[in-house]
Image (cartoon, grey):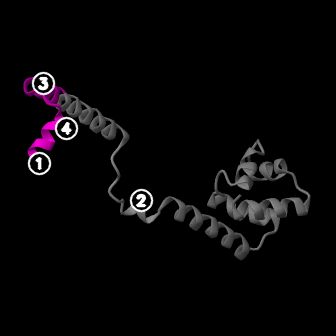
Amino acid sequence: MSKIGVLIKGRRIFLGCSQMRIAKHLGHTSPQFISNIERGLCGCPIPMAKRIAKFLVIGRYEFLTAMWSDFFDNFNKKWKPETIFPRRKSVTKRKQIKRQKRAKRIRKSRNLWNQSKAKKTGLDFDQRERLKKK
């Protein structure tokens, strides 16, 4: 919940106003606008801010502090240092799958090559490796 939403809802309940009454005062036909602000789904539009504050008898300083606080909270969530200066991304899923398939093909071809060598020499790959080391 946003700070401005908590402030508006608290003041509205304290004064005994409904969301519909505030919405009609602001020229809206539905209380959904006020509900969205109170739940933090959307911000309070600046042109409406003064009218809302005046209707709910909220001080300018208190109202603006809540609005700026919400603004900076959202700003910090959306504009993290990683989004401004992105780190090199890890391999995407598609590239990872492509690499795995390629590695599988290479392993398969190596196995086929090893099997053909084993047939020609009569030795397994492991046995040939042991002979090379000696």
Of pointers 1 and 2, the one earlier in the residue sequence = 2
Residue 120 belongs to the span the image colors magenta: yes
Can you tell which quarter of the image residue 61 is in?
bottom right
Question: Circle 3 — which element?
Answer: helix
The reply to whether dot 4 and dot 2 touch (C-beta < 8 Å) is: no
Instruction: Single out the mark in the foreground, 3 or 1.
Output: 1
Q: Identify the residue under disc 2.
A: 83
| Residue at screen point 63% across, 57% down | 45
Of pointers 4 and 2, the one earlier in the residue sequence = 2
Give the spatial CA distance, label 2 vs label 3.
53 Å
Instruction: Single out the mark in the foreground, 3 or 4.
Output: 4
Can you tell which quarter of the image residue 52 is in?
bottom right
Q: Assess disc 1: are there few (<14), some (14-19) or many (≥20) residues with their C-alpha within 10 Å of its C-alpha.
A: few
Instruction: Report the label total.
Output: 4
Give the spatial CA distance, label 4 vs label 2.
51 Å
Q: Identify the residue under disc 4.
A: 126
Give the farthest residue toward the bottom.
61
- As drawn, is 47 to the left or to the right of 32? left
- Which range is magenta? 112-134
Q: Identify the residue under disc 1.
A: 133
Of pointers 3 and 4, the one earlier in the residue sequence = 3
Q: Amino acid at mark 4?
A: Asp
Q: Assess disc 2: are there few (<14), some (14-19) or many (≥20) residues with their C-alpha within 10 Å of its C-alpha.
A: few
Instruction: Single out the mark in the foreground, 2 or 3.
Output: 3
Q: Identify the residue under disc 3.
A: 116
Give the spatial CA distance, label 3 vs label 1.
21 Å
Q: Amino acid at mark 1?
A: Lys
Of pointers 3 and 1, the one earlier in the residue sequence = 3
